[in-house]
Image (cartoon, helix red, strand yellow):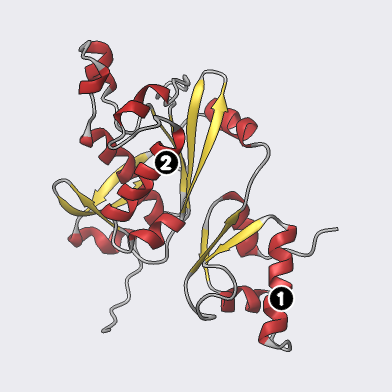
Amino acid sequence: MRPPITATLVEALSRPTQTTLTTLINEYQWSDRLVLQALGELGEILDAWNLELSPSIGTGGLDDSRIVRAAFSSNLLDLTCAEIARGEGASLEFKESLVLDVKKHVLGKQPIEKCFSADVLQSSLKTVAAYLNSGGGTLLIGVADDGKVVGLNREFLLIPGATKYDFDEWELYLRSMIEKCFQNGRGVSASVQINRIDHEAGVVARIVVGARRELCILRAADGEKLFVRTGNRTLSVNLIDLEQYFNLEKRYL
């Protein structure tokens, strides 16, 4: 029988969740335990529920920000197929590609080698940014707007510096762009879980984004911007509209 699980860990089973060791210990009401004892029990609970912490227990302080998320899942293909069948919504979006300009390649009949698009890449990064600021969500890349699985295989050769032309290089490139295009990029990347889904129609990337406590600013091609999710739309928020979307407290650091 698995041990009891708190609200934070339940959320982490579905998407990366930002927390601290202090928060987790307090949720279990372990105020009467020694810190090392509490951390040992917490580690056992995480293992029992196939959850992992980044940074791990034993690294950093009790109040340092961490990401807790599922270590693995055996039924991601079924889950992804169910999500595709459900269709896009506020917390689920489909993208046909990460860097391939599909219109230029298919409709314009241009060779695929000439169809790398920074604008297409920015579109996915904007969705990630919006989920980070709006409660999290799932992005499926390799799936057309109508739910047809087209796969990522054809764009592997477009990844800059690629030599193997496979999913691993594709994921490494996406993570490098997340780290480059966001303030505290490594921390942001820890809130983004990327899984390869081997669908019969092609490889799909299932990208689960957890919400961050701090605002996540994207360094877009036309400047630094803040994006949020409203319904099934990704919107850019101007400085004057911040209070409409966020509860802001003025603090001097």
Q: Earlier in the sequence, mark 2 or mark 1?
A: 1
Residue drawn 40% across the image and 38% down it: 169
Q: Position of residue 212 (x, y in %)?
A: 42, 61
Q: Which residue is mark 1?
A: 40
User: In this view, which residue lies farthest toward the right?
Assistant: 1
User: Does 10 sit above or below residue 207?
Assistant: below
Which residue does the image show at 65% across and 77% down from the upper left? Answer: 25
Q: Nearer the viewer, residue 112 or 84?
A: 112
Q: Nearer the viewer, residue 27 or 109?
A: 109
- Position of residue 211 measured from the top left corner of the image (x, y, whole percent): 45, 57
From this viewpoint, is residue 29 visible? Answer: no
Q: Which residue type does callout 2 highlight?
A: Glu
Residue type for callout 1:
Gly
Q: Position of residue 222 (x, y in %)?
A: 13, 47
Q: CA distance from mark 2 to mark 1?
A: 33 Å
Apparent side of residue 40 relative to residue 91 in the rendered image (left or right):
right
